Image (tube, coloured by chain):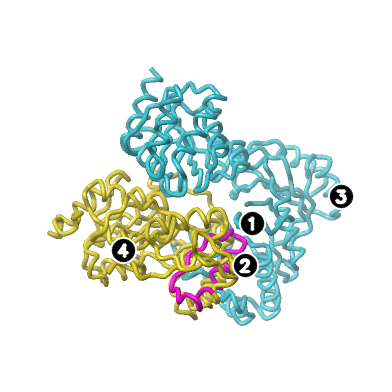
Chain colours: A yellow, B cyan
Amino acid sequence: MSIFVNKDTKVIVQGMTGAQGTFHAGQMLAYGTNIVAGVTPGKGGAECLGVPVFDTVKQAAEATSANASILYVPPAFAAESILEAADAGIELIVCITEGIPVLDMVRVKQHLKNLPARLIGPNCPGLITPDECKLGIMPGYICRKGRVGVVSRSGTLTYEAVNQLTVANISQSTAVGIGGDPVKGTGFVEVLEAFEADPETLAVVMIGEIGGSGEEEAAEWIREHMRKPVAAFIGGRTAPPGRRMGHAGAIISGGKGTAEGKVKALREAGVTVADTPDRIGEALVEAVRKAGIYQEVLIP
Amino acid sequence: MKIHEYQAAALLKQYGVPVPSGIPAFSVEEAVRAAETLGDGPFVVKAQVHSGGRGKAGGVKFATTVEEVREKAGAILGMTLVTKQTGPEGRVVKRLLVNRAVDIRREYYLSLTVDGAAGRVMMIASGEGGTEIEQTAVDAPEKILTVPIDPTLGLMPYQSRDVAARLGLNPAETKQFIRLAAALYRLFIEKDCSLAEINPLAVDASGNLVAADAKINFDDSALFRHPDILELRDLNEEAPREVEASKYDLNYIQLDGNIGCMVNGAGLAMATMDIVQAFGGTPSNFLDVGGGATAEKVAGAFSILLTDPKVEGIFINIFGGIMKCDVIAAGVVEAARKLSVNVPLVVRLEGTNAEAGKRILSESGLAITPADDMADGARKICELTKEARR
């Protein structure tokens, strides 16, 4: 099992012939990800790393019956590329691109409401199910196949969390970086739902940060629905009060968004929260010990 | 990106939002000429800095005559304005806006911004305008109206009509409000704003709606398609180090501490600041070198830290994913060779090509303290910085 991706996931790489696309496609292939096609407009018919390249996602999907797509497309064109993948019937779309205009994402999010596609990102490291499928830019060698799900708003802090788990001899089912942009596809709650429903995942690590209200919403969902133990860390506790965007930001957030508020909400939901970022692994160990499942989440 | 009030007013005017007659001025003489051109007073002389709370700080003055404009302009121009948002060092006033004073009878609040959770542009309005709007949001949230806007439909007139009714506007004012809100939304979308705020939205003695003060911010990610907006950038309003950092496309924020931090990824950068504080240090900055940094970019980042006189120690914390540790190491060595490193330097490298990176550092002959993990690195830099002080 695992969530969202596994060894049967058939992947299209949009922007595969670009420098970033080729580099990371090579890394993903080396990890064992089943890349079936690349897409670069104007390069249809070519081959890249032994994979056929198509002009459009629709052509690629029809020829290969791919069900996932990952984008290495520059910010100015990324929103359109997400829509192209969604309209071609791709079920899982992962957008790595950083710096997509916010209003582009507002339009994308609206359009995706009418389609079955799940979007992860943008501005995210992607996701990985160890030993099965890496869809993104995470360093695969730090992961160990197993039982603990990881969900994070931050890229490199995701690696930090996974690495601490591995060092603590804790295995992972799937690690998902949902991305740090204000307007994004999949949020914490949807990933937590998937982990709760996945029989192979026994516990979850959640990495949040200051700003927005995603962590508070996650805390509420955990309190009401989650039976599996959760450990968490919130980054930015010592960050100075951010550059303020007039009054509107403060009005929208309505008091949410501070580290203290998020930590409090999570603790009240029964989550074990690490006080410092070096203690993420420890917090998970504490949570699974309390739940009496420590032995079951160890690396086999 | 932020712009000045007078620039925001010009944009609003261009889109058909009524604003007070006003003219920007860069000297006292220009301010006097501006008042003469505007004709009858009274006037308002307003400091133009990128900060709210200017009135409370003494940067906004009324003047009944042109002579008084001369006097007030002389007082405000060159003064150091300290507000909550500028920090204790304040901001020197270099530009003014001279407006004809609006005879304000009632004040409202109106803004557009993106609500991340909803994934939509949100119109926010309130009958309680003015500077206490945030307090109102906490004390009496029912007095704040929020209206989510469907991006495919845009702001519909019925939405504005409903807001106008709830604000208690009369039929003539409602008509103006619908036009004004539509114009503001068009500006917001066409120019990729992140905030368009009118506070106060005033009703004057003749019953006309006018944007008596305005603040417009833009989405930095969308500036590539708005060269006209980019021209409005005022580098005087940004910390020099931040301007320098933006040349290298670095995500840098100046803080008050003494430990320079260089990290890849915003989340890890914040976590690094947290752990430095946990060990008793205070970060001098937030610095995210980003995902695909080159040796040149890393060297630029390192030199920004090294040339900061407040920095007494540097902690480099890298977990390479896209970013390769050997590239980081090469950049650090290159910059350290060019500039003299006279503060303790602790480096933690993990992830892609970490071993190659560590080798480059140890073979460089530079005085670099390696760290095993982020806690080890934070502890070491805090200790070394303290020792160096003694």
- Dot 3: what SS? helix
Q: Chain of mark 1?
A: B
Q: Which mark is residue A41?
A: 2
Q: Position of residue B60 (x, y in %)?
A: 67, 47
Q: Amino acid at mark 4?
A: Ala
Q: In percent of the image, x 31 and y 59: which residue is there? A: A131
Foreground tag (3 vs 4): 4
Q: Amino acid at mark 2?
A: Pro
Pointer 2 local density, CA inside 10 Å: few below 14, some 14–19, many at least 20: few
Foreground tag (1 vs 4): 4
Q: Amino acid at mark 3?
A: Glu
Q: Amino acid at mark 1?
A: Lys
Q: Position of residue B218 (x, y in %)?
A: 63, 57
What stretch of residues is rendered in magenta?
A60-84
Q: Position of residue B371 (x, y in %)?
A: 34, 33
Q: Are marks 4 and 2 on the same chain?
A: yes
